[in-house]
């Protein structure tokens, strides 16, 4: 996380990240924002980061003996080994040291993204494009950009016109 900070990575993506954080966090009595870990997982779900295991077709061993059957008729379902579900995301961010249980401040939110990038099961195809850790994090930011571009625009407008909401 420190390397990303030194390289101004988070600064370059500030409007997107702050827009998402501000949109989903809530204001505490003391006047600062906090985002719950469950809301963070919902952000991952909404941006299609989570991977549900998909059934794959596996040929039945006996299908070779039954040459008159059409392809796929005697196949059985198996479950894909690649998955990243809500439980996996919760496990990845569980050890973020928050002041209040599952409430994250903005820096904790950034740490959560980094922790997800560390444990995420990228496909072989995705890994051909991911050469650095920064690319791993950018993978998620691209998904966030697609899903939450309106949040980014709202945040940018708010920054340009702070007195008009």
Image: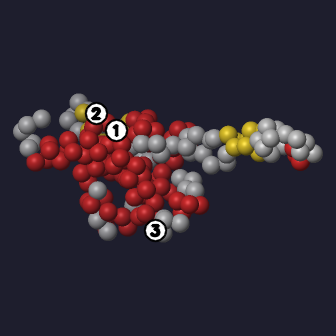
Judging depth in this view, the residue of 93 and 126 nearest the camera is 126
What is the distance, in whole Å, between disc 1 and disc 3 at their CAs?
Answer: 28 Å
Instruction: Tell me residue 26's x, y (percent).
Output: 28, 33
Q: Choose between 71 and 21: the one closer to the eye.
A: 71
**Of 148 and 98, the residue lying toward us:** 148
Q: Residue at x 73, y 43 (%)?
A: 57
Q: Residue furthest front?
A: 68
* Apparent side of residue 70 relative to residue 40 in the rendered image (left or right): right
Q: Residues within 10 Å of mark 3 (few under 14, many from 20)?
A: few
Q: Which residue is mark 1?
A: 35
**Contact? badges 1 and 2 (CB < 8 Å):** yes
Whole-percent x, y for residue 150 in the image: 26, 41
What SS does tag 1 mark? strand
Determine if residue 137 is in view.
Answer: yes
* Residue sitting at x 23%, y 30%: 29
| SS class, disc 3 | loop
Tell me the SS state at disc 2: strand
């Amino acid at each position: 996380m420190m390397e990303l900070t030194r390289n101004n990575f988070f600064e370059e993506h500030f409007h997107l990240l702050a827009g998402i954080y501000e949109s989903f966090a809530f204001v505490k009595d003391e006047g600062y924002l906090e985002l719950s870990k469950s809301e963070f997982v919902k952000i991952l779900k909404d941006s299609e980061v989570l991977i549900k295991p998909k059934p794959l077709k596996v040929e039945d061993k006996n299908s070779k003996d039954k040459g008159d059957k059409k392809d796929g008729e005697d196949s059985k379902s198996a479950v894909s080994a690649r998955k990243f579900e809500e439980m996996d995301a919760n496990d990845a961010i569980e050890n973020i040291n928050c002041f209040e249980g599952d409430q994250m401040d903005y820096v904790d939110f950034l740490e959560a993204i980094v922790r997800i990038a560390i444990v995420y099961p990228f496909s072989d195809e995705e890994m051909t494009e991911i050469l650095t850790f920064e690319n791993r994090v950018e993978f998620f930011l691209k998904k966030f950009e697609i899903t939450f571009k309106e949040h980014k625009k709202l945040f940018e407008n708010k920054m340009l016109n702070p007195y008009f909401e």
